[in-house]
Image (cartoon, rainbow, N blue to C red):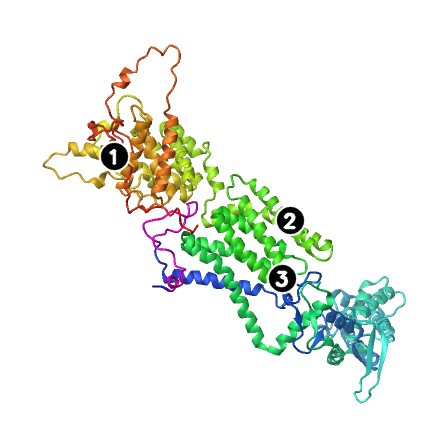
Amino acid sequence: MSVLERVGLAPKAGRRPRRSGIRLEGRGPVGPPPLTRAAVLRRLTLLVALVGLAVLAFPTVDTYEAGVVGEVWRGDDVVAPFDFPLRVPDAELEVQRDSIRLAEPPVFVERTEALDVTLTRLDTLRDRLSTALDAYVAWKGAGARGQAVQAATDSARFAAIRAAFPAEVTPAQWEALTASSAAADGSAPAPTRDGAALGVRVLREASRVARLMLSRGVANVPADSLIGSQLAVQREDPRVREERLIARADVLALDQAYATARRELATAFPASPEGALLAFSFLQTSFEPSLHYQREATARRLAEQMAEVRPTRGLVKQGYTIVRRGDVITEDIHASLRSLSVAQRERSGERAVVRTLLGQVLLCLAAYTMFFLYLYLLRRQIFDDFRSLALIALLFAIVVAGYALAARSTTVHDLAVPVALVSILLTILFDSRVGMFGTVALAVLGGLISGFDFAFSFATLFAGMVAVFSVRDVKNRSQLLVSAGLVVAAYLITLLGFALMRAEPPGDRLIGEAVSVAINAGLLLLAAPLLYGVERAFGFTTDLTLLELSDTNRPLLKELSLRAPGTFNHALQVANLAEAAADAVGANALRARVGALYHDVGKMLKPEYFVENQQPGENPHDRITPYMSALIIAAHVKDGVEIGRAHTLPRVILDFIPSHHGTGLMEFFYRRAVDQNPPEEQPVDEAEFRYPGPRPQTAEQAIVMLADSVEAASRSLQKPTPRRLEALVDALFRQRLDDGQLDLSPLTLADLTRIREMFLSILCGIYHYRVKYPGQEGESDDAEEQLPERLVEPKPGMDVALPPAIQTTDAGGDGATDGEKPQPPPDRQAVPPRAEESAEG
């Protein structure tokens, strides 16, 4: 005995788990196969991943222990178990720290020799520039005198000095410098009226601007680094502990100083932009700021000031009653409860963190167990399909991620998380019970993550249930809009109820919650595109898709009606029978109808070989052997599957094509083969005259099989009176049971009784008595009354296996008259009785 059996959580013996669209009470002959170790491991991995994601969604601070300001405290009275300090809120602490950062002046060291250093560097540049220009003049002079060797030497010296020049000088600026130097030397026309060389003027203006800036003081950091209104300036000598405060406005930052230099030099060289750029390059290369930022000293002073900020204020004494049941949570009460929570964690150390984490894991595991245990016990087909479990886990993960975002954000409310969207998707993809259990699990998880918020859990549960009920029988995609409106109404009703129960009047809080609900409703509009994507990505077939497939104007059904009109009419009648019968036993009526519409599409390839498409006259089966006839008749199953795949029919509809005959026997051709077989030959193999199968495995497939045989056989009744129809239906049902065609389906004998009654009701309506029109009163029914007492006249081309009990003597049957009503099907163990009185489901 397994552990689950010992605790009473194992599936009951003989109970077949409910499949999507099939009644829960249906039983099958065998239970589901046990899962392999790899399958169990995959499902455990999904569960662990979901639990881990839910634990990560919890907020890092136990804000739920402090409640929500403005709400009524519904817990027990809270008394301080020990003395603990009252902590300052984090937001207030951060405000104090920000004010210190703004008020504390940065520390700078003043370098009094900054101007001397700058001028010395400019003098160095003057010497290097003079050397370079002298080399240039010598080079040009030697070239003018024809001294090629000397000119080459001077040219190389000029190039070397130019390459090693410390300041950045462009080729155009070098050209201006050399031209100005040559003019000053008299070897070229003067480019300027004052006669001063460009290099001399550039260096002179650079020195002037440097003195101008350093007279105010220049810091070696950009302006955005100087946050405060003052600067603390110290002496460069560490032995001198002298410090003065200067206003930030009296000091130039480095980028401000350079901007000032550009403006001054542009004014000094109005007609020579290259001269202004060259002067700025010389100044930038030589400039030494007078105030140097001290990062470590500034950080040390800031840390000393931050240490003065106290995270606590006041003390809560042991025995003090912090809050009583029914009190409204104020800011002070909230701060005290929060301080108590932090103090408890500090006193417990790391053990409190481990305990909290373990508690979160257990609670999340319990929430998920409610849902997955339900799938394991009562929706085993979904539990066994890992693709379905993966889709459910993905939807749950999206909602939990939304919870995590809401728990960590001040702008996103929990009510904006689209739980109802997942409820709608689960209901349409699976059924309403899966949607309800999923809604319960998500509502409980949301309440845990949001701090045991009962109001949120109740509102989410109510809105989710309304969403499930609104789409349990969805017929078109526009109905999703109505569902979104109902969900909004459900949220608003619950939120208004809680708002009226609070102490303070409804106001801004209710408006904020309503805005979150509106966002949630907007997300519900994604249901239609999400359904389309899920159907394509995971291979699901929803009722919305089935409704689209039921349109008889679709290309495949249109082609069937043109190429095989008799088969098309037969499919319509089978669809009506199957839909009514499925609805009577609680199966998926829409799935049964659509499966019936497409079950015989394979006949369109050779329609003339099937009796419903034949015209009076020669029958093609008369020219071929029974074996060839059986191959042609059976081929419509394989052809139908191929045609369905070519038209991208979903798998759930394709399964109706090979299962609507199961492994039934083609009785007419089998008996013809037996009659034509010589005695000395080997006996006819019955397997050669059976359909390839498989047998029906769902209630809908079994209903379509029964509807197909009943509709086809009823057309061959020579006198379709109610008693003959009843005998026909009973005989066909008995034959399917005796042949084992219904062994794999979850139909019970009670289901078969309901299906039989529904078939008879519809068939009697089709073949009802008709009033004779004027001119027909004299016609006699003698000819009809003298017909042989037989129910069905089998014809070549009928693809329905007729039981011998209802066939004519010509086909080897015994024949059944109106007075020979077949007995109801015996109580066979292959189809156990339905658990009408079962407490489950």
Mark 1 element type: loop
Quadrant where the image shows the N terminus = bottom left
- Depth check: 623 or 15 in front? 15
Residue type at tag 3: Ala
Span of residues in magenta = 3-31
Residue type at tag 1: Pro
* Residue 411 as seen in the image, left or right of residue 581: right
* Residue 765 as seen in the image, left or right of residue 682: right
**Position of residue 588 measured from the top left corner of the image (x, y, whole percent):** 43, 42
Contact (CB < 8 A) between labels 2 and 1?
Answer: no
Q: Mark 3 vs mark 1: which is more N-terminal?
A: 3
- Depth check: 36 or 453 in front? 453
Mark 2 and mark 1: Cα distance apart in space:
61 Å
Mark 3 element type: helix
Q: Residue at x 59, y 64 (%)?
A: 58
Query: Neighbour class for label 1 at 10 Å: few (<14), some, many (≥20)?
Result: many
**Position of residue 562 measured from the top left corner of the image (x, y, whole percent):** 40, 28
The residue carrying mark 2 is 493
Q: Residue furthest bottom?
A: 239
- Is residue 75 highlighted in magenta? no
* Residue 265 as seen in the image, left or right of residue 304: right
The residue carrying mark 3 is 407
The part of the image, by quadrant, that contains residue 56 is bottom right
Res 473 label: none
**Position of residue 417 measured from the top left corner of the image (x, y, whole percent):** 60, 54
The residue carrying mark 1 is 803
**Position of residue 816 measured from the top left corner of the image (x, y, whole percent):** 24, 29
Query: Neighbour class for label 2 at 10 Å: few (<14), some, many (≥20)?
Result: some
Depth check, mark 3 against mark 1: the one in front is 1
